Amino acid sequence: MFIAIFTDLLESVHRIGENHQNIPAFQNMLLNLSGKKILVTGIANNRSIAWGIAQQLNAAGAELGITYLPDEKGRFEAKVKELTAPLNPSLFLPLNVQDSSQIEEVFNAIKNQWGQLDGLVHCLAFAGKEELIGDYSATSADGFARALEISAYSLAPLCRHAKPLFSPGAGVVTLTYLGAERAIPNYNVMGVAKAALEASVRYLAAELGPVNQIRVNAISAGPIRTLASSAIGGILDMIHNVESKAPLQRTVTQKEVGNTAAFLLSDLSSGISGQTIYVDAGYCVNGM
Ligand SMILES: NC(=O)c1ccc[n+]([C@@H]2O[C@H](COP(=O)([O-])OP(=O)(O)OC[C@H]3O[C@@H](n4cnc5c(N)ncnc54)[C@H](O)[C@@H]3O)[C@@H](O)[C@H]2O)c1
């Protein structure tokens, strides 16, 4: 009798501990995003990191909303629509983050069609090509303002509009690069923008955490050939440097970044917020 009561007591203490910490039970540990509604920004083409992320979120069972950057001839819209059709996105919307009415419309659509948001992927950046070569001191005031507005500031209004729609435990993921912390040749103003973005992640994590356990994190990806990175002077040298020096002796793929984004938007990462997670084949640990 005493042993039975003691065993019951132990089990109930164990259960209270599990409930208190809200840790997924062992049988639910596999990554599963079924039932989660996630907005993915920043797909331009099949090389985009956001495309790798969208594919892995879809593979894990998430329902996706996709945004594209509208242009006069509708080229991005057509390309992104065709590319993402196999993932059956339930929302497909234009979004230029410099246009506040477009931001509002995206979140109105989420409110009306989804009623809630479980994840937000901010995977966009821009700097003029002339700012991404040569001396940082040559950066123009307009170029600086535009790079910072699109690449760093934009995370704040997206989170502001998402805040009332976020479900408990929802997550935000943005993309950054080592140039935020180290001087990388030609990365210039984009490094300054990424430093601002990483600081924004910490402030947003502090703001949104108390609101229903919402988490905000950044992935610092190694260099990958994409439309945006092709504007950086010497991007191929950056990639070759990583291939020869990174502990894994290679650079990373869009899908590897996508896997980490899926983890950060899942319940498996419930204790992680305000962090920059490196998906760079280990390159950032090198001393030289
Ligand atoms: N490629 C790399 O080596 C690398 C490494 C680390 C981090 N990143 C970051 O990953 C993210 C995605 O870049 P990518 O390399 O996949 O290139 P990409 O060109 O495929 O994606 C950049 C996206 O930004 C979007 N964009 C630009 N201006 C915008 C605006 N005003 N409003 C809305 N969207 C806008 C573009 O439409 C495009 O979809 C960026 O934040 C980039 O800095 C890239």
Image (spheres, rainbow, N blue to C red):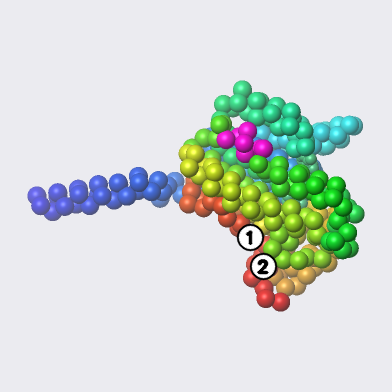
Q: Which residue is drawn at 51% across and 44% down?
A: 209
Amino acid identity at mark 2: Cys
Residue 224 relative to residue 58: left or right: right
The rendered magenta stretch, by its main secondary structure, is classed as helix
- Real-space CA distance between mark 1 and mark 2, rounded to the nearest whole angstrom: 8 Å
Q: What stretch is highlighted in magenta?
A: 157-163
* Residue topped by disc 1: 278
Magenta run includes residue 162: yes
Within 10 Å of disc 2 (Cα), the crowding (few <14, some 14-19, many 20+) is: some
> Is the residue under label 2 in contact with that under label 1 (CB below 8 Å)?
yes
Which residue in the protein does label 2 denote?
A: 284
Picture residue at 90% right of the left edge, 32% below the top: 73
What amino acid type is highlighted by mark number 1?
Tyr
- Up the image or down, 251 lies above or below 50; here it is below
Label 2 lies in ligand 1 vicinity (Cβ under 8 Å): no
Task: From the top left corner, tell me how far across and down residue 226 is, in percent.
Answer: 80, 52
